[in-house]
Amino acid sequence: MKSALLRTSRLGALATRAFSSSSEPLVLVEKKDKYAVVRMNRPPVNSLNTALIKELDATIKKLEDDKSPAKITKFWTSLQDLYLRLYTTRLAAVAAIEGHSPAGGCLLAMCCDYRIMTSGKPMIGLNETQLGIVAPTWFRDTFVNTIGHREAEKMLGLGLQVDATKAKSIGLVDEAVALEEVFPRAETAMGKWLAIPDMARVKTKQLMRQETADRLIAIREKDLEAFTDFAQTDKVQKSLGMYLASLKKK
């Protein structure tokens, strides 16, 4: 939320009365496109008491923490654009995965033609359900295309992440190697892709991927609306907050 407009008939009249007994909220909030209107609601003159001060303070904090729909929309449309660009690019793309790759990181890796991942502790997967989020259709389609329906159904349902060895066994990555070998192996793999006649490689990739891309293009507005509504629910916001806090501890 960028701004808050404070609207009151009288601001600054101090009072030492006890908390108001009225059942009406002391502060009313009306959200606009880029700002919110905050109305003090303690008739007759909106005199300040402890309850009103606390409610105003809590309201401002809530607005500061508010994830504006405009920001969510910009984020999601940008991700849609990036996915479509990378998934359908005529360029050969090799993913060198040197660390953890959950959610969007996993999606971008799957957009590449070949994936090489560090063995050991790093994990990869679509862990959305662990956060109380449903993976969008285009995440699911790409996952199914990569590892098959049954494995995708299980991993999506449980929000599973797996290490490189397991990921290789199910086709999520193509190679699991030591950290220092990831980039050299990626360069070797790129050489193999570039050795293929360009027109044949590009056309084959288009034939394999265009149907999946077209499904997102056809529903991208509905997908945006669904994600925006879902992402703003208190439960999802709380889950995401806890997840981000846990990442800071690592």
Image: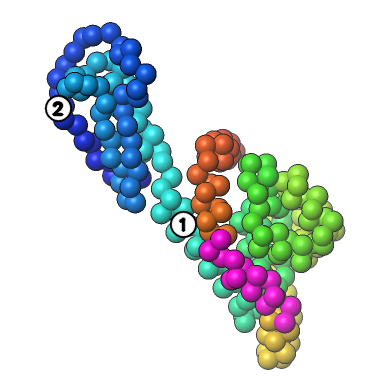
Q: Which residue is mark 2?
A: 10
Q: Which residues are magenta?
A: 207-222
Residue drawn at point x = 33 percent, y = 47 percent: 32
Of pointers 2 and 1, the one earlier in the residue sequence? 2
Residue drawn at point x = 53 percent, y = 68 percent: 81
Left or right relative to 104: residue 211: right
Of residues 40 and 53, the one nearer the viewer is 40
Give above or below for 209 relative to 55. below
Residue drawn at point x = 23 percent, y = 9 percent: 17
Left or right relative to 109: residue 226: left
Is 209 within the magenta? yes
x and y percentages locating residue 64 in the rendered image: 36, 38
x and y percentages locating residue 133 in the rendered image: 63, 46
**At label 1, which amino acid type do we have?**
Thr
Q: Where is residue 101, by image quadrant? A: bottom right
> How many discs mark residues in the rendered view?
2
Looking at the rendered structure, the secondary structure element under dot 1 is helix
Mark 1 surroundings: few (<14), some (14-19) or many (≥20) residues within 10 A: some
